[in-house]
């Protein structure tokens, strides 16, 4: 059973930064892609950033230039560095991994809450 465990969420003021981590129980290169999603209660889950190994990283327009997706393959961990945070970035952030992306993601973490105060 593949496990994805997010950490790093919390409360931050607008303009601040947070770094989310996602540790996997499997070699990250055993997936063909990994992504960060977020969800606000009552709204659909949205893709924030996704990386397909060997290709460019996708960022949602709303976060491009502020968020950066990175990895540490030795630790089987990926990160989402979030800078210049805005109140509208408040959400539960989920890490996901897929073996047939973009045809969906196969594995999901339980999420970590990010709250940005104004």
Image: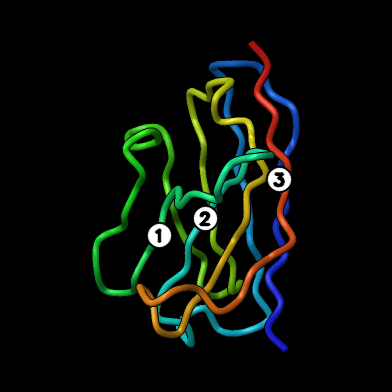
**Residue 46: percent from the left, percent from the top?**
49, 49
Residue named by callout 1: 50
**SS for tag 1?**
strand
Question: In the image, 90: left or right of 86?
Answer: right
Corner quadrant of residue 27: bottom right
Q: Earlier in the sequence, mark 2 or mark 3?
A: 3
- Indicate left or right for 43 with 60 as reference: right
* Residue contact at pointers 1 and 3, CB within 8 angstroms: no
**Mark 2 residue element:** strand
**Count of picture labels:** 3
Between the residue at mark 1 and the residue at mark 3, the CA separation in whole angstroms equals 18 Å
Residue topped by disc 3: 8
Pointer 2: what residue? Answer: 36
Q: Is residue 3 above or below residue 13?
A: below
Kindly give the residue lying farthest to the top in the view shown. 118
Residue at x 51%, y 42% (from the top left corner): 81
Q: Residue at x 52, y 78 (%)?
A: 28
Q: Quadrant of residue 118?
A: top right
Using the image, determine if residue 92 lies above or below residue 22. Answer: above
x 48%, y 87%: residue: 30
Q: Residue at x 35, y 73 (%)?
A: 102
Mark-to-mark CA distance, 2 and 1: 6 Å
Q: Are marks 2 and 1 in contact (CB under 8 Å)?
A: yes
Where residue 115 appears, x then y in whole percent? 70, 29
Q: How far apart are the alpha carbons under marks 2 and 3?
A: 13 Å
Q: 55 and 41: which one is in front?
A: 41
**Left/right of residue 100 with respect to residue 111 in the rendered view:** left
Determine the image quadrant of residue 64.
top left
């Amino acid at each position: 059973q593949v496990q994805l465990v997010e950490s790093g969420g919390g409360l931050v003021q607008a303009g601040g930064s947070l770094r989310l981590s996602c540790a996997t129980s499997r070699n990250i290169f055993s997936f063909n892609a990994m992504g960060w999603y977020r969800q606000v209660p009552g709204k659909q889950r949205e893709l924030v950033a996704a990386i397909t190994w060997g290709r460019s990283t996708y960022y949602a327009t709303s976060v491009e230039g502020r968020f950066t997706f990175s990895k540490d393959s030795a630790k089987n961990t990926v990160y989402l560095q979030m800078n210049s945070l805005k109140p509208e970035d408040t959400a539960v952030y989920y890490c996901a991994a897929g073996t047939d992306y973009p045809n969906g993601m196969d594995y999901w973490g339980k999420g970590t809450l990010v709250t940005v105060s104004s």
